[in-house]
Image (tube, coloured by chain):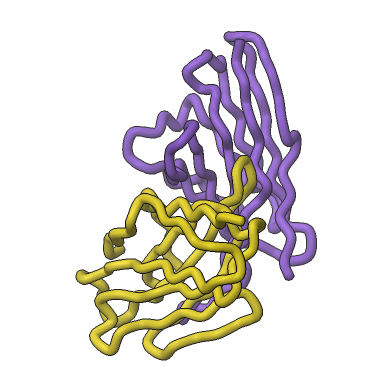
Chain colours: A yellow, B purple
Amino acid sequence: DAKTTQPPSMDCAEGRAANLPCNHSTISGNEYVYWYRQIHSQGPQYIIHGLKNNETNEMASLIITEDRKSSTLILPHATLRDTAVYYCIVRVAGNQFYFGTGTSLTVIP
Amino acid sequence: GAVVSQHPSWVICKSGTSVKIECRSLDFQATTMFWYRQFPKQSLMLMATSNEGSKATYEQGVEKDKFLINHASLTLSTLTVTSAHPEDSSFYICSARRGASTTYNEQFFGPGTRLTVL
């Protein structure tokens, strides 16, 4: 599975959009991009995933570049409850998840 | 959405004892479950992949005789930490994969079990 690179930490003002980048330059054609988040002392929570096209659900939007070498998770209106560690993972469907170091997002009042 | 539970949520034990952690998929059948370990301020580390009815596959560096995994049914996998020592103190998280499609698989995580070995 391809490795990912994320900034270790980010801050975002409450109510503003949080844009979390992820680089996955070695992604292969059959690997999906997944985003999970982990709030302190809890299990990871699924956010969104995609293969090629941009995706949106009730939690977030996922923007994948045309060459698929990077992606951005967008939380449109960040709240204090969005403070968590966000993990970007690329993997072949059915394979195990290997977590990187993630981005610690702090939403500031 | 699919729910995965773990029991217990927190366990404290004496050094040398064995501890069993259960992972259950509550509303779906999971042919494959995964066990992770997370130390403070670190990311999740995959320990093993558990397939129903067969032996677990362990990641490199994980002692299979110390971390016994049993996946006897489609809704239950157990992790037993044998002869636990303080360095085994960690947050143990399981996940369960729903569906057998090879195009993409949803994987749902449990809430985690915090193990403290005194």
Position of B104 with respect to B9 (left or right) is left
Q: Is residue B51 visible?
A: no
Q: Is residue A27 visible?
A: yes
For the point 56% across and 15% down, the residue is: B83
Is A27 located above or below residue A63 in the figure? above
For the point 48% across and 32% down, the residue is: B39
Q: Nearer the viewer, residue B73 or A29?
A: A29
Q: Could you tell me residue B32's position as x and y percent?
A: 57, 58
For the point 67% across and 29% down, the residue is: B20
Q: Nearer the viewer, residue A25 or B101?
A: A25
Is B40 located above or below residue A17 in the figure? above
Q: Could you tell me residue A30's position as x and y percent?
A: 33, 80
> Which residue sits furthest left?
A26
Q: Nearer the viewer, residue A57 or B107?
A: A57
Quadrant in the picture for the C terminus of chain A? bottom right
Q: Tell me where residue A69 sits by quadrant.
A: bottom left
Quadrant in the picture for the N terminus of chain A? bottom left
Q: Nearer the viewer, residue B61 or A97?
A: A97
